[in-house]
Amino acid sequence: MENNEEFIKSLLAHFPAEVPEHVQFEADEKALLLSRYIFVSSGKNRTGYCTHCRNTFPIENPIKQNGKGECPACFSKCRYKKAWLGRKALIDTACILHCQKSVLNPSVVTVEWLYASRDYRESFENVSTEYAAVARYVFDYDRKVCQKIEGGCGCRWWTESGFSTPSFLQNRSFMSRNIMHGTFEDGIAGTPFQYSGWQRYDYEDVLKYLPLVAKYPSVEILTKAGLDSFVKAKIYGYKTYSAVNWSKSKLHHIFKMSKQDFQMLREKNPESSLYYVRDFLFNAWVVQQWRKEKSKMNIDELQKNMQSFSVEDDLKTFKFIRQFTSLHRLFNYANKQFEKDGKHFVRRHQVLITWQDYINDCQKLKIHIDETNIFPKNLRKAHEETIKRVKHYEDELMRKKAKDRYEKIKHYEFELGQLKIVVPFTPKEIIDEGSKLSHCVGGYAQRHVDGQTTILFIRNIKEPNESFYTVEVKNEKVSQVRGIKNQPPTEEVKTFVEEFKKQKLTKKVRKAV
């Protein structure tokens, strides 16, 4: 904690103690330009008070609340306010983003979000613009220190991992939101960031771009090559398929390929499509996989298969299958299965989904995946067979769990008068109970078997096979009792349940069990 506080102090030292005059001018003359009022007094000798020049002058003509006017002293365009009316919500606010060099080191760039306000709620006379820094950014290229800190409008400062708009300014309404563009030119000029190409980005994106420039040489290279869309993809967190090596400094190395492959990729993807980042990066990833595997397929055939099987839209399924075979064998087999069973597979992508499900089923059944079973002659039929086997396997597991669960809770069985508690033996009994009584207990079957809750049946001794009421016990307490169509228990059932609770759910009984 102490180290973090010292680090924050070292960052704050880069900023001036007072708000710079040009920023104050921006606030008063632009950001809060509409925060100029003439407050008019009541009575015969009415006077007006201008909040901008703070002069008082006579008012002769009638005025309307919030009507437009002009101060005769400073000629400011103002709005009229009746001084005797309430002002409990009259506070004007703006946020201002500005950039400047560090006061400690001119090669360090600093950026600041300021919250500016003019508060007329207590008094409209002598109101000044108040400032609070809510977020500060320090970009030190030489020391590779790029950090954002937030202060929450006057509170203590804390570090933030990202470089986005501060939380204090989000979801708030302001009179204006001003970005002082000229200050960025002045603040970045003469620093190591000067020729980084930052001008190609929106000003709020610059706050995310400068840290990337300090960290990755590729960022500046891509920007200067006119490929800033790839950098924006990283800034915005878009999908890049891990196709970019941001640490490299040569264009073809950035895309993890040789000059020849990069040239080939650019030829196959016209210059205009380079800016369609997702497609280009996916194709780059395909080329990378093709070279890495030294695939027998030519690149045109591979890209055609990638497209026809919609791999770009479901890369996860493709990568899963790829663990078990090569690109050439994968597509060769998938194409044959599609042609063999075209009536079942409407789209080629469905072959991959079925294949993944088949492999998953084999793993559930603890079947070792090798050459003998990874390529079944008929994928659809093989999958249908594994579905049956998995269902049988899961049913067996469920029956075993249900049996174990029954042994643990059979002590809840109880009789009194004409009623008795029956403990279900299988999940099917719970599902059937819900169907017969038209309530939702059937959805509790799995939770019952897993021990998350306990479902019990109330039966009439004279009709033991007829559903009557259902009881849920949770944490050794009866949580609900429901009859047909969720009807509440009768007085007889309530009395029975109370006695069941005394005899089966008390601490003494549980200890005895």
Image: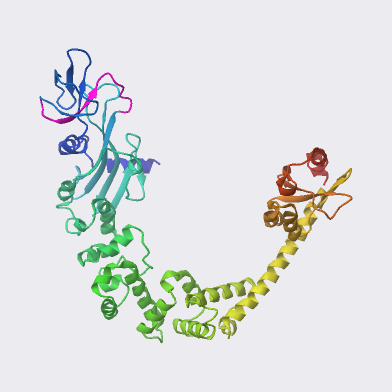
From the viewer's perspective, tell me whether residue 490 is left or right of residue 475: right
Asked whether 206 falls inside the magenta stretch, the response is: no
From the viewer's perspective, tell me whether residue 440 is left or right of residue 124: right
Percent position (x, y) of residue 31?
21, 38
Q: How is the image coloured?
A: rainbow
Percent position (x, y) of residue 312?
41, 71
> From what the image shows, is residue 97 above or below residue 383?
above
**For this rendering, which residue is in front, 49 or 188?**
49
Task: Kindly report the secondary structure that dominates the magenta region of the rendered protein.
Answer: loop
Percent position (x, y) of residue 482?
73, 46
> From what the image shows, is residue 124 above or below residue 361?
above
Q: Residue 367, can we see it?
A: no
> From what the image shows, is residue 98 above or below residue 75?
below
How many numbered discs? 0
In the orientation shown, which residue stands out farthest toward the top?
Answer: 44
In the orientation shown, which residue stands out farthest toward the front?
Answer: 62
From the viewer's perspective, tell me whether residue 303 is left or right of residue 11: right
From the viewer's perspective, tell me whether residue 412 is left or right of residue 388: right
Q: What is the span of residues highlighted in magenta in the rendered image?
A: 73-89
Location of the N terminus (image quadrant): top left
Q: Quadrant of residue 156?
A: top left
Q: Quadrant of residue 58?
A: top left
Q: Residue at x 37, y 80 (%)?
A: 291
Q: Residue at x 50, y 77 (%)?
A: 346
**For this rendering, which residue is in front, 119 or 175?**
175
Percent position (x, y) of residue 69?
16, 28
**For this rendering, which residue is in front, 116 or 481?**
481
Q: Residue 468, can we see it?
A: yes
**For this rendering, which residue is in front, 208 or 93?**
93
